[in-house]
Amino acid sequence: GALAAPDLQSCHPPEDLPDTAADVSCCLTYRPGTAIVDFTPPPASSPLCVRPAAHLVDEEYLAKYERAVALMKALPDDDPRSFAQQWRVHCAYCNGAYDQVGFPGLELQIHSCWLFFPWHRYIKYMHASMHVLSVLPVLPREDHRRRHVRSAVLELDAPGGMTLPAIYADQSSPLYDERRNPAHLPQFTLDLDYNGTDDLTISRDQQIDQNLRIMYRQPDPGAGTIENTPHNILHFWSGDPRQPNGEDMGNFYSAARDPVFFAHHGNVDRMWHVWSGLRPGNTAFTDPDWLDASFLFYDEEARPVRVRDCLDAAALRYTYQDVGLPWLDARP
Ligand code: C2O
């Protein structure tokens, strides 16, 4: 059967944290008596929001985004809309804080399997939804859904985007995280073949060229490969080697503590979106166990929502800034 949303009452300490990880809770806030609601997509008439490339955003955009993240971080940890709940939901779904409903002892896990794309589409979407916090309480409730999905994404496959975007480098910004690899701050070029050691002899242009060739290989044979590269590589490349487990980005439990996680997953989602567009006839997604898998998140009104079926980004009323796909011409 399809994966069901977890029972929020039955959270336990995460079962597969690395031994050297500090004590963390990955439990989501549980408020007795709060009903879980089914997620409803925004009305089809709402405008399509364009998620901008993080390396191209303007100051006005950046100010709004920083304000939203600062507000999420300022909320008490147990507020369902807080930044803390957003990184914990990732930990909960990766490190064994809940068992699958009806299968005691079987942990929730959304990596290395076909739930990877839909689950991460939603965590990014919910993070984007929290941006309304920056305009609350000015907007009437029905306007929330129309305003929320402009949330920057890394465009690592575009040459201009092959470093951590500068917006993540300002130490006084809420987008900053001190647990990152200090050698890989902007403008250090990403290496999509990173194995733990930087090749300091390669020029920026050569590195970009090599990355484009690696990207070219990704859409074929399809899903699974994107999870490994660029997804896992970027996690490993940006985590802090001075920490015991590559925290934050380099380990599942801690990854979403770094705000760059959400821009990274914007990019992964964009890859999925691009890939679906490159293969319009691809109707492989018909297995009900996949289509009916449901997950639980908190929404911007602090309600626990059950989400499922997110194959079409347009139905969620967002799309991506078009920066071209230079790797399509980079046959290795
Ligand atoms: Cu759930 Cu990028 O990992």
Image: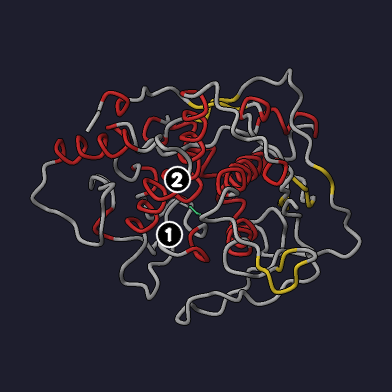
Question: Which residue in the structure is indicated by mark 1?
Answer: 249
| 11 with respect to 326 (left or right) | right
How far is the residue under mark 2 from the one under mark 1?
Answer: 10 Å
| 315 with respect to 164 (left or right) | right
Residue at image x 42%, y 43%?
226
Q: Position of residue 210 (x, y in %)?
A: 20, 39
Q: Are marks 2 and 1 in contact (CB under 8 Å)?
A: yes
Above or below 134: residue 86: below
Q: Position of residue 39 (x, y in %)?
A: 78, 40
Residue sitting at the far bottom: 19
Residue at image x 18%, y 41%?
207
Tag 1's secondary structure? Answer: loop
Residue at image x 28%, y 39%?
214
Q: Amino acid at mark 2?
A: His
Tag 2's secondary structure? Answer: helix
Q: Nearer the viewer, residue 307 or 279?
A: 279
Give the mark nearest the N terminus, 2 or 1. 1
The image's mark for residue 259 is none
Q: Position of residue 80 (x, y in %)?
A: 72, 56
Q: Nearer the viewer, residue 136 or 223?
A: 223
Q: Position of residue 113 (x, y in %)?
A: 55, 53
| 59 with respect to 300 (left or right) | left
Residue sitting at the far right: 33
Question: Which residue in the structure is indicated by mark 2?
Answer: 264
- Quadrant where the C terminus sits is top left
Q: Amino acid at mark 1?
A: Met
Q: Nearer the viewer, residue 34 or 332?
A: 332
Above or below 198: residue 331: above
Q: How many residues crowd around disc 2 within 10 Å: few (fewer than 14), some, or many (20 or more)?
A: many
Above or below 163: residue 9: below
Above or below 11: residue 332: above
